[in-house]
């Protein structure tokens, strides 16, 4: 894949003007990102805007007890760090979950392009707005009034909606997902996540095959976490 093809894969650039795309093509860098690598860390000064062309990345925070909380899992076409456009240090860490390619641009060049491009400006606002809405939804789902198994069901349903592919048994998540990482997504202990997952598997709502999760019926899983 060349830089022009990578530009087409970036959701943020779909409505960018030809002039903006020409500028960004001249300064963009496309590179491979291996699973387990970090693009940036929390509180690090970041002068690049990153976009996933293929593969998958996670944005996470480490709390005062040293526990990881995964905030977002982002795949093909997604922008990873719009907040770096304000010039402040990174507010999260970014880890590659699935090997792929990453496109990056200097923050300065991105801001210059945005000054002349209404479509690009709108795309950045839309991308940030979507993340804010997802954060609001996460906050609602982390209240103590919601049972842990329902929180897990909601998380797996969302992952299936974003990164699932049809298979004979239902919808398979296109990512390796361990119990430990599920616990990180929920902000809980591994043992707790394991117990909650067993509740879902015992009811046939989730199947697990060697770190691959299959949702036999997404509608039933949705009904489960929405039920009183």
Image (spheres, grey):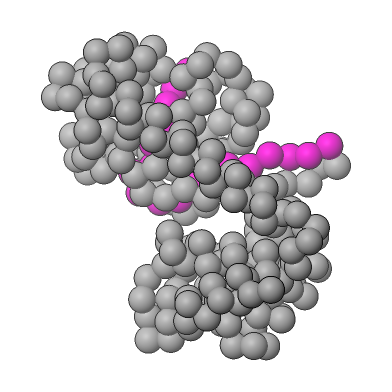
Q: Main secondary structure of the magenta part?
A: strand
Image x and y of residue 226, in percent: 60, 70
Q: Nearer the viewer, residue 17 or 53?
A: 17
**Hey, which residue is sitting farthest front in the picture?**
228
Q: Is residue 61 shown left or right of residue 54? A: right
- The correct choice, above or below, for 208 with respect to 225 in the image is below
Image x and y of residue 192, in percent: 80, 67
- The correct choice, above or below, for 3 with respect to 107 in the image is below
Q: Is residue 58 visible?
A: no
- Give the image quarter of residue 224: bottom right
Q: Is residue 95 magenta?
A: no
For the point 78% across and 61% down, which residue is it?
A: 145
- From which residue to which does the magenta span run? 47-64
**Hey, which residue is sitting farthest left in the picture?**
18
User: Exactly how many numbered labels are in the figure?
Assistant: 0
Image x and y of residue 87, in percent: 52, 14
For the point 48% across and 83% down, which residue is it?
A: 216
Q: Is residue 63 visible?
A: yes
- Give the image quarter of residue 77: top left
- The correct choice, above or below, for 29 with respect to 130 in the image is above
Q: Is residue 60 magenta?
A: yes
Where's the C terminus, which quadrant? bottom right
For the point 58% across and 82% down, which residue is it?
A: 205
């Amino acid at each position: 894949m060349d830089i022009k093809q990578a530009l087409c894969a970036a959701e943020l650039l779909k409505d960018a003007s030809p002039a903006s795309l020409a500028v960004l093509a001249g300064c963009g860098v496309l590179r491979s990102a291996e699973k387990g690598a970090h693009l940036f860390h929390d509180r690090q000064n970041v002068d690049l805007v990153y976009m996933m062309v293929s593969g998958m990345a996670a944005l996470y925070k480490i709390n005062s007890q040293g526990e990881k909380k995964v905030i977002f899992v982002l795949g093909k076409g997604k922008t990873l760090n719009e907040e770096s456009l304000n010039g402040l240090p990174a507010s999260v860490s970014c880890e590659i979950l699935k090997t792929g390619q990453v496109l990056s641009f200097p923050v300065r060049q991105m801001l210059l392009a945005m000054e002349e491009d209404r479509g690009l400006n709108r795309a950045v606002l839309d991308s940030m707005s979507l993340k804010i809405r997802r954060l609001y939804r996460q906050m609602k789902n982390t209240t103590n009034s919601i049972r842990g198994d329902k929180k897990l069901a909601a998380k797996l349903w969302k992952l299936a909606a974003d990164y699932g592919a049809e298979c004979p048994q239902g919808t398979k998540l296109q990512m390796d997902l361990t119990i430990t990482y599920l616990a990180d997504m929920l902000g809980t202990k591994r043992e707790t996540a394991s117990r909650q997952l067993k509740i879902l598997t015992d009811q046939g709502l989730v199947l697990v095959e060697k770190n691959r999760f299959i949702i036999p019926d997404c509608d039933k899983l949705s009904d489960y976490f929405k039920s009183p």
